Image: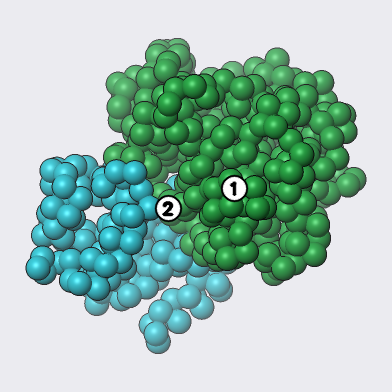
Chain colours: A cyan, B green
Amino acid sequence: MNPVFTSEIKSKADAILAKYETKRAPILEVLRLLQEHYGHITLEMEAACAEYLEIPPIDVREVMTFYSLFYSRPKAKTRFHVCRTLTCSLLGGEDLLKYMEQKLGVKTGEKTPDGNFFLETVECLGACEIAPMLQLNDREYVGPLTKEKIDELLNKGRKG
Amino acid sequence: MEKLISKYFIPGKTFWLEDYLADGGYQAARTVFEKYQPKDVVDLVKQSNLRGLGGAGFPCGMKWSFVPQNTGKPVYLVVNADEGEPGTFKDKYILVHAPHLLLEGILIAAFANNVHKAYIYIRGEYVFPYETLKRAVEEAYAKGFLGKNIFGKGYHLELVIHRGAGAYICGEETGLLESLEGKKGFPRLKPPFPAVVGLFGCPTVINNVETLSYVPFIIQRGAEWFAKLGSDKNGGLRLFSVSGHVKKPGVYELPLGISLREIIHTYAGGIPGDKKLKAVVPGGLSAAILTADEIDIGMDFDQLRNKGTMAGSGGVIVMDETTCMLKALLATMRFFAHESCGQCSPCREGTGWVHRILERIASGRGRAKDIENLLDICSFMGGTTICALADGAAMPLRSYPMKFREEFDYHIQHGQCDIREVGVPIHA
């Protein structure tokens, strides 16, 4: 048995595959399944995914690097994806991003040395009505952001 | 103003199957399955003047009539829920508040086009909308609104929700199809159009979430009624997403053809702090901007196109007098540079150059020929690529310096902004 596709993961992946016309079509869903299970996707997992879907490993690499929601390195505990597109920019998003960089002592795209926080910018997340906003931990939308709100998120992250 | 889709937008509430049925849900689909032929539905939708509300504005009924039914291949329905045009957030409201309205629209569209397998492609970042939709689909399967023998008529429809993984270009319909086939989202050369050669090489109907969500209303209340709600050849209402410098940002469901002034000042409450309006993006980030004295315009696909901009996805972004237009254009072009898929050189290189030139000007190192260069790049980006992303970048890029030339020149000559307001968000 493939060490990446344990019997539990394989049965979930098989169920996904059954819904599609071709083996390769659900690659995003299969990669997401691996990421949900392992936290991030290593080269070894990419190769296992390629073998499972019966496609060349380079095709998996291509998909991994084309889309922005996959992690190829271990994730920080608390992750901030701060929107910088027009509406968020108009309403102060960039100043808040600078504030977060200062508070965390990292630049955009970096993880704090203790591995607790990750700060990244993203393009429009479809939530301009709560601008300026960010996505927390690849899940919850938070906005409208203020410095106080950011302090609160940071405190929660430090405790959590 | 009567609300159609947005009557379901009650904060904190999702109309689950039980609530939706209590509100008369799935009656339109039942009528169609019991009394109509597929062609009747296509004709009704044609007569209703329903336009594609994802952004292109293509007449929905006409799109359906292009699907060949005699190829021996299955016909697919693909629902575009990859809402990503900046300034647009209306589909999210449908997914969260009225998922069954969308499912009913899908059911009717499937019947009209002889579809037995449909996919909903939802952007990966929409986690809660996905979870809501997933539960609604499970409910619909459990109660026989999806699956086998729907309404006891022997009709079957399978529906798969497919999540994207963060790529604006996958909202472009052929990029979406590539992504759905498990590849990176490189748009396809057209023709052939997806109606003929689409998903897995088969005829495919691709519709936006909002477009399909209006279909049950058209069935229930008639094509003529729907057409009359809007303006000439622009049937019905649409959901305008309004954001930026307005007192009440949000989704407003209003007739196609309503004036932009009314949207900004009446519905969205005007501009905070009684500041003056400076510019507006009328239809998502890819649209050319309008100045404050151009807002007495009817917001439909034809009127806006005649004004050199577009109705697009209905995303209205409002900018007040404190906005630095250079910074606004920089944020805009940074987006396109980031989201260009890299397939076509004019777009991949052009959006990158433009972004870098604008960054340089913003940092105080503008050069005399910069604006000419920007417009030159703009002229080779439009119309030279496989998909419309480059055209969508060229449209705002041309409009900003055209309408605010003095401000751009000032930036280049003085290395800073002439907006002196202290503490404004986008400033020099």
Q: Tell me where residue A120 appears, x and y as whole percent.
A: 36, 58
Q: Is residue B49 above or below residue B207?
A: above
| Horizontal side of residue A45 vs B122, given as left or right | left
Q: Which residue is mark 1?
A: B154
Q: Residue furthest right?
A: B1
Q: Tell me where residue B236 appears, x and y as whole percent.
A: 79, 34
| Horizontal side of residue A76 vs B36, given as left or right | left
Quarter of the rendering occupied by the N terminus of chain B: top right
Q: Is residue B87 above or below residue B341?
A: below
Q: Which residue is mark 2?
A: B163
Q: Residue at x 15, y 66 (%)?
A: A4
Chain of residue at mark 2: B
Local SS, label 2:
strand
Q: Nearer the viewer, residue B99 or B87?
A: B99
| Horizontal side of residue B293 vs A90, given as left or right | right
- How far separated are the C-alphas under marks 1 and 2? 29 Å
Q: Tell me where residue B378 appears, x and y as whole percent.
A: 45, 17
Q: Residue at x 46, y 28 (%)?
A: B203
Local SS, label 1:
loop
Categorize mark 1 by other alpha carbons within 10 Å: few (<14), some (14-19), many (20+).
few
Residue B216 visible, this orientation: no
Q: Residue at x 66, y 31 (%)?
A: B38
Same chain assignment for discs 1 and 2: yes
Q: Amino acid at mark 1?
A: Gly
